[in-house]
Image: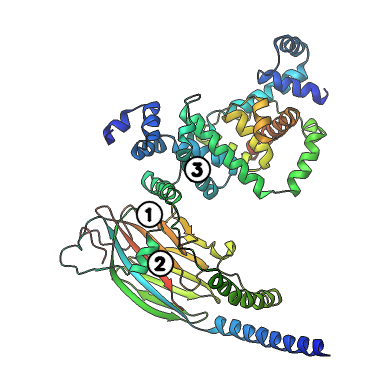
Amino acid sequence: MRAKLIRATGLGWFSVALVLLACAEVRAQAADMKLQAYLLWGTDDTKSPEGKAYKPVAPEILHKLKELPLKWTLWFEVNRKDFAVSQGAVKEVPMSEKCQVNVTKISGTEVEVLLIGKGKEVVKRKQSLPKGEMLVLGGNAPNSTAWLVVLKRIE
Amino acid sequence: MTATDHSSADDRTLVRAAQRGDMAAFEELVARHRDKIYARAYSMMRNEEEAVDLSQEAWVKGWQRLRQFQGEASFGTWMTRVVINLCLDQLRKQKRQRTESIEAMDEESGGVERQMPVVTSNPTAGLERAELRQRIDRALALLSHEHRTVLVLHEFEEMEYKEIARTMGCSIGTVMSRLFYARRKLAALLADLKKQD
Amino acid sequence: MDFDAQLKLQAFLDGELPEGEASKVADWLARDREAAALLEELRNTRGAMAGFEAGIQLPESREFFWSKVQREIQRRETPAPKSAPTPLLARLRRFLAPASALAVILVAGAVLIRPAGPFDHAHTAGIETALADSGAFTYHDYSAGATLVWLSYPADNEVADNDEAGTIE
């Protein structure tokens, strides 16, 4: 009798846990995705170019960049945008006069990112972007420097 | 050793410097042989991304094992063996079973290739080098991993039958059957491609 | 021609036959047109393969490829930091609480159909459509949780200003 009572109570709590998990899953799919986009400039020179007051890049971003096969030792933040994108919507995020990134939330963690440079569509990428992870699009810039557009999911 | 010295040094000198920890010397070796190592990985894997990854891994392993290299073969040959072994490990892991087991049955009974008519005209005659390369590329892509591997090891790595057998972990008879099948199939594929022109 | 004879022809072509056998095959080839035709086919195929790899080039720049190799070498050569030993009771306590939570999650996970989690390889592999850039390549670092897509086109850049040296606005 006692064993049956313990089993029933256990099963009850287990069912509650399952229901809560299922609800959380549904909420996660529908919720807006919060992202940060950075436009970064990479160089081996210790200072920003003349007339430009670029900030050093945030430590948590720098830490992840150091794990990637990029040769530049210094990264400066040219621009940063915080935004949210809803399910199925396209968020256009201008990063500079010449650069824009369009982000579409496809599902719970899946996004499609379109990079537009000087009015031309450069690359489109579809991938999963869990919380805390980054997508880094980059290329060479004049004088052996580099540019990066970093997309980081924060929520 | 300066950067200028590296570019004019021979492989043996660079290897000795790299064995003493000179990473710039190793970089020069990588620059000299990277295409060859990649080409070997690509011939075996038929996938650009995989071939790049395996080439990279081969170079890392090359650095780690450099002290073991005693100059018994050329450095380039030694490195191609490193990448070949990595490719073989990768192919074993992938285990594409179904189509290959059917082909294996055919080749072991001497079935399919015995029935292929002999290709009498040279399907590569009159072709420019680039076009020929393209056709071989397409034909190689249609072979199974096992058959392609034997062909690559024999034709490009210039291994003898018994060495291929040891590398692939099979009998010499199997090597001979697979090589024969691969060559006949390639001839038929090249002839087909020529007919399509 | 039986299969063994065909394999013998191949071995003859590849120089794998002992001298005595090789001369017997040479005599046979002089008499048998079918065998000679098969040998010719095998020879043509071998000739076609020669030099095939010479045109294949690694599709990454010297610098980029080397930076990946170097980074990986350094990563493997850097020993992992050792942490101070923790008391047994603290270790047990740390184990028990998450273990029970994990048990609930594992059972729930087996029941629910979940979308791909952060450690699923298919989840991290994205799909790229290179539009202006046909030479883009991708690198994913699982420990850092970052994916790099490096665009090789154009030689300058799509987002930087070519007129002002060193700027990207």
* Residue annotated with mark 3: B55
Tell which subunit mark 1 falls on. Answer: C
Task: Specify whether residue B143 is in view.
Answer: no
Q: Is residue B61 or residue A149 the one in the foreground?
A: B61
User: What residue type is disc 2 on?
Assistant: Leu
* Vertical relation: C137 (above or below) B42: below
* Distance between the alpha carbons at the discs numbered 2 and 3: 30 Å
Q: Tell me where residue C62 appears, x and y as whole percent.
A: 38, 43
* Distance between the alpha carbons at the discs numbered 1 and 3: 23 Å
* Distance between the alpha carbons at the discs numbered 2 and 1: 13 Å
Q: Tell me where residue B68 appears, x and y as whole percent.
A: 49, 32
Q: Is residue B72 or residue B138 the one in the foreground?
A: B72
- Identify the residue at the far left of this view: A51
Q: Tell me where residue C129 appears, x and y as whole percent.
A: 49, 61
* Residue annotated with mark 2: A115
Q: Is residue B125 or residue B58 the one in the foreground?
A: B58
